Image (spheres, grey):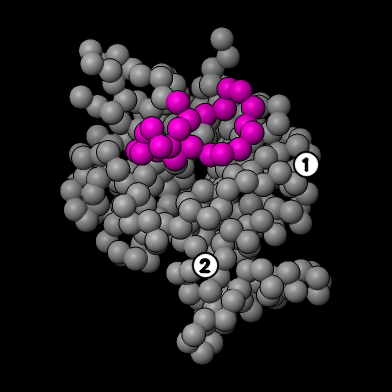
Amino acid sequence: MLPGQGAEGSKVAFQPDSAANPTLVFPDWPAPPGVIALVSTRIGGVSKPPFDSFNLALHVNDDPSDVLANRALLQEFLEPGLHLQWLQQVHGTQVIGATADGLTKTGDAVFIDQPGLAGVVMTADCLPVFFVARDGHSAAVAHAGWRGLLDGVLERTLETFTVAPSEVLCWMGPAIGPCHFEVGAEVLDAFLAASHDDDQRREIRESAFKAASSPGKYHADLYSLARLRLQRHGVTDIHGGGLCTFCDADRFYSYRRDRDTGRMASVIGIKRFS
């Protein structure tokens, strides 16, 4: 029996409660009705080690039949008929408009403005950022590693909305925390160089980078970097952060921890209007 089914195979209506359903993490944010948002964990699928067990990525050398079975299971957790827009991610800034054609497209963010569609990004340390307009008519999800954050993937995603940034809510999903994300000085220097003024540079130094024990190394905070970028561009309602993929090996994949590993899916969509 699939976790998304009842005793006779009928679909169960899953409630947004991660404790009751450990296969999924649900954003804790005041999203408007009609918006579907969740993050898968590594729990509850069919993939074998080292991808055990709910790997949703086809590019990590997992058995494709297992991945497709896991994707079918993911669909069970969603509204029937919801079309998923999958991506081939390249650590860039391109935002793809979701379609129902079933084709995988190259990009690092998905924008949704039609009911019955959803966007998916996959991560195993990078930061998934969810967006939704307060009126519930548009939504997006972005894949943001440090390169994407630096190059502006969150800003490009915001630009796809027709409402003002102050009318957009954001939630930051599981990502590698500053406790384990060690980078070289060149990463700090790149963010400082991209800043527009001394205030931005001071904020980055104070909140997003802390000196590590190794000379020339820093602990980088993806959550803080994303929050600073979003706030600078007018987003005032930002939630989430603090779920570290590296620390929580029971629930999350982490590329930096395990190298050979799977990927979680972050999904946001708009239900069909009744």
Q: Residue at x 42, y 48 (%)?
A: 122
User: What amino acid is found at the position of numbered circle 2 in the picture?
Assistant: Pro
- Find residue 126 and report its horizontal and vertical position in percent: 48, 57
Taking the view exactly as shown, the residue that stands out farthest to the front is 19
Magenta span of residues: 15-36
Q: Label 1: how many residues lie within 10 Å, few (<14), some (14-19) or many (20+)?
A: some
Q: Is residue 252 above or below residue 215?
A: above
Closer to the N terminus: mark 1 or mark 2?
1
207 vs 243, left or right, is: right
Secondary element under disc 1, as helix, strand or loop, is helix
Task: Check residue 160 for magenta coloring.
Answer: no
Q: Which residue is mark 1?
A: 166
Residue 178 numbered tag: 2
203 vs 103, left or right, is: right
Indicate which label's residue lies in the foreground, 1 or 2. 2
User: Are the residues at dot 1 and dot 2 in contact (C-beta closer than 8 Å)?
Assistant: no
Residue 243 numbered tag: none
Q: Label 2: how many residues lie within 10 Å, few (<14), some (14-19) or many (20+)?
A: many
Q: Is residue 178 above or below residue 24?
A: below
Q: CA distance from mark 1 to mark 2?
A: 28 Å
| Magenta stretch secondary structure, dominant | loop
- Find residue 206 and report its horizontal and vertical position in percent: 69, 73
- Find residue 214 and report its horizontal and vertical position in percent: 47, 87
